[in-house]
Amino acid sequence: MDLPSGYGPNTEIDDEGMDPVWKQLAAILLARIDAEVYPAGRAIPSLTQLLQEFGVSRGTVLKATGHLEDAGVLRAVQGRGVFVLPKQ
Amino acid sequence: MDLPSGYGPNTEIDDEGMDPVWKQLAAILLARIDAEVYPAGRAIPSLTQLLQEFGVSRGTVLKATGHLEDAGVLRAVQGRGVFVLPKQ
DNA sequence: GGGCATTTGTACGTATGTATT
DNA sequence: GAATACATACGTACAAATGCC
């Protein structure tokens, strides 16, 4: 998926940076999964919570999580949440 | 990518159907590529042309072509167009 | 180099639908 | 039924890359 490097679990979104916001967000979420801030088998915060925390739009969160789904890191279940898949 | 079946090069978008519009559009574009309506090495119509032909939004076209990019069927080049990759 | 048109990329906000709790 | 949560789709605006004068 080619995410930018150098993003940790607590990195803030940089609107003026060279990386797109959705890629920055995907990198941060991935860092939190790696650090088990979001442990495998559990759901990450809801889209509404994430867009509030990072100050981005719903579509941007969806794009970030969608790519992590494609990468096999997350699985979204309508009505329930977005779950961290077991590290394989 | 799990596109719905039964869509040909001239299928029309069905708003009431059970398949999402963007998946229908991706299936139609893929059918046109298979039928060489859009030959390998050439660009498909621009986003503006496609959204006009199918009566959908820009975002919907982008989602359809984006998934065909992930599938290795298309490659978008900013400022130039969206090109059909050689069948491998 | 500058200016313009074309084309894709990103991001926002909003509305509605569907599934789960 | 109500609340929560993800899914789809629309419209809009601006940015970035390309190509052609």
Image: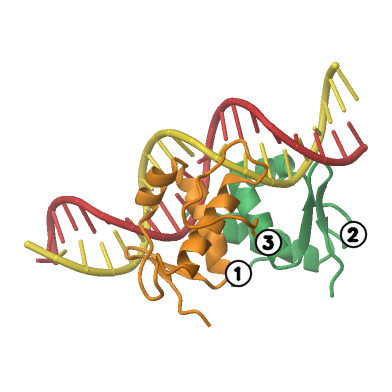
Chain colours: A green, B orange, C red, D yellow
Q: What whole-number distance in Å separates the C-alpha atoms at marks 3 and 1? A: 24 Å
Please provide percent x and percent y for residue B83: 40, 69
Q: Chain of mark 3?
A: B
Q: Nearer the viewer, mark 3 or mark 2?
A: 3
Q: Secondary structure at mark 3?
A: loop
Return the residue found at the far bottom: B88
Q: What whole-number distance in Å separates the C-alpha atoms at marks 3 and 2? A: 25 Å
* Amino acid on which disc 2 is placed: Gly
Task: Name the residue at 49% across, 54% down.
Answer: B62
Marks 1 and 2: same chain? yes
Please provide percent x and percent y for residue C5: 19, 51
Residue to which mark 1 is pinned: A3
Residue to which mark 2 is pinned: A41
Taking the image as drawn, is residue A20 in sight? no
Q: Secondary structure at mark 2?
A: loop
Q: What whole-number distance in Å separates the C-alpha atoms at marks 1 and 2? A: 23 Å
Say few, some or many: other residues with alpha carbon within 10 Å of mark 2 (under 14 / 14 to 19 / 20 or more).
some
Task: Name the residue at 65% across, 50% down.
Answer: A62
Q: Chain of mark 1?
A: A
* Amino acid on which disc 3 is placed: Asp
In the rendered structure, find residue B2 and report the number of the disc placed on it: 3
